[in-house]
Amino acid sequence: MVRRPKTRESPGMTDIVRAPAAPMQTGHNEFGTLPEWNLDDLYPGVDSPELKRDLEWAKSAAKAFEADYKGKLEALAKSGRLHEAVDRAEKLGDVTGRLSAFSYLRYALDTQNPEKAKFLGDIGQALTDLSTGLLFWELELNRIDDQVIEAALAMDEHLARYRHWFAELRKAKPYQLDDKLEELFHEKSVTGAQAWNRLFDETMAALKFEVGGEILPIEGTLHLLSDKDEKKREAAFQGLGKTLSDNSRLFTHITNVLAKDKEISDRWRGYKDIADSRHMANSVEREVVDALETAVRSAYPRLSHRYYQMKAKWFGKDQLNAWDRNAPLPTSDERTFDWESAKTTVLDAYGRFSPKLREVAEPFFVGGWIDAPVHAGKSPGAFAHPTVPSAHPYLMLNYLGKPRDVMTLAHELGHGVHQVLAGPQGSILSNTPLTLAETASVFGEMLTFRAMLDKTTDKKHRFAMLSSKVEDMLNTVVRQIAFYSFERRVHTARKAGELTTEQLNAIWLEVSVESLGPAIKLNEGYGIFWSYIPHFIHSPFYVYAYAFGDCLVNSLYAQYEKASDGFAERYFELLKAGGSKHHSELLKPFGLDARDPNFWSLGLSMIERLIGELDATDPT
């Protein structure tokens, strides 16, 4: 019901992890005038009467909700009036979500600003405090007999809209604790996981890396790992390794604490598998995720191993160094896209699929919904924040004009379009599970890639685009499943006691050898690279959602290529549904079923097909 401030990778806000941020820009003119956020659509400022009004209203509304409904929900359900409480919960969720989004988005623009960090923390504390009295809501709903809930849904058409939400909510019934324990877990989260998350974020943002005699923040250092100059890539790799190793004690401690914190929570709640809580939050069955992991890991030799062997050959090497993995090819696409060109490229690609898709996307470019410039203190990477249905999403980029930046724009815009289309579902049903949250983003990226490829006649540019797309897919599918395997091993091992840095490094190296294959040399210093991945800190086991989304979209796109008639209409219905239906119901109109092993084979075959196309092409 209450939405607290979100960290970059927390559920409800999606981002793309394959696009590292970059060095600070000196101005906007190099790429034209880059758009910046206008947060006035949320609140005019931290001291605005509107913000103070909403915060006070939320506090009083939360107290009134507790007074009116605590201990009375079963009677309300039997009387056919449960929809009244749902409506009030939804309104409260929208207001607290607006407060949460505003505090986080201000912070994301300048994470080193003490005032913005304090405001984020203060809003988070206020929302935690007011939501403590609301814990009864979902707990008490789950104590109502199934037959009573079913009867209430049958007699009330308005309430019946929330049938899937009730079904998902009741899956948590076996794992919920008594009210006092739930209240303790809730209140302690501010000084527990949330505090360690913030420590990680602020430590990582403050780290300095020496690269070739220059001192850089992490975003600039990561950016150099994809530089055309091998000496710069190696220097960035060495700089990363040294600084991360120098801080390994802290990162090891944070990892141990959070893994133990999760183990305690899971044990008290009775989860059988270390990732079951994530699967439940994603509305996906464990066997589906297990099938995905098995399918991708068994495909490593056909995908990543084969591709990196090809890439080593293109570089004239038997084996690539770790800093060469994301290196641009000798024939790489060095074109620069100013902002207007990027905007036109993406919107035209969206419009070619469907004029309606373009129509939904266009407002992002005129209303201050996108923040594109790179500057000191800004969160690295890119994300789409849905905010609340009564407002609109915001997209954050670090735009540097490269073809990959155009793809990132297409990706995040897809998230934004999805969030806009799902908005009418309301603050409860518009939240899309992570397994489907990547659908529109990856599909939008694929549309843009195909449109750009069709317009590219230069053989070297086409080859470079194909290889770049394959690398993105490998980073989204293979790398994220490797991350998931790493997390499973770490959380499993943590049950037996604290893990040392050396143990964590060893697990990371073993997983990397398996996923990357013999063509990648894991140079000294690579073992500590697990420590900068924020997903492990903010959202344990989140990462498989990227692979799920990419394979799902590959399967969807294969269906689109086979029979495009009526596809757009079915696609829009999927996006509009938000979180109101199970993934099996949403995929059925496309003839797809994630429980079918062939589903994953179809998605992976598209990556394999592109690798085969590259293998048959002369890069020169």
Image (tube, rainbow, N blue to C red):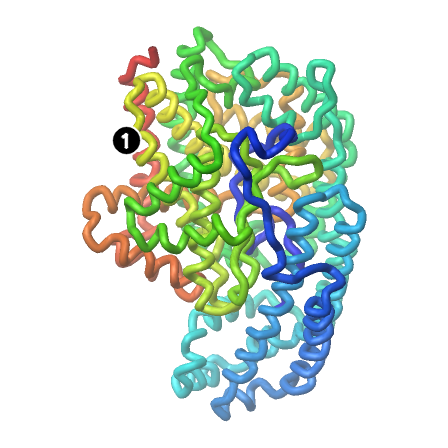
Q: Is residue 286 visible?
A: no
Residue that carries the numbered disc 1 in the rendered image: 454
The residue closer to the viewer here, 99 or 257, is: 99
Crowd class of label 1 (few under 14; some 14 to 19; many from 20; radius 10 Å): few
Give residue 405's position: percent from left, percent from top: 49, 33
At x 43%, y 6%, the residue is: 316
Q: Measuring from the top left, give residue 138's x and y in whole percent.
A: 59, 73
Hey, which residue is sitting farthest top in the picture? 316
Identify residue type, mark 1.
Asp
Position in image of residue 304 (x %, y %): 42, 26
- Mark 1 falls on what kind of element? helix
Q: Residue at x 51, y 65 (%)?
A: 389
Q: Quadrant of the C terminus?
A: top left
With respect to residue 319, does 281 lie above or below? below
Please say whether residue 174 is visible from this viewpoint: yes
**In which quarter of the view is residue 214 placed?**
top right
For image coordinates 76% across by 50% down, the residue present is 117
Occupied quadrant, residue 381? top right
Q: Is residue 592 above or below residue 507?
A: below
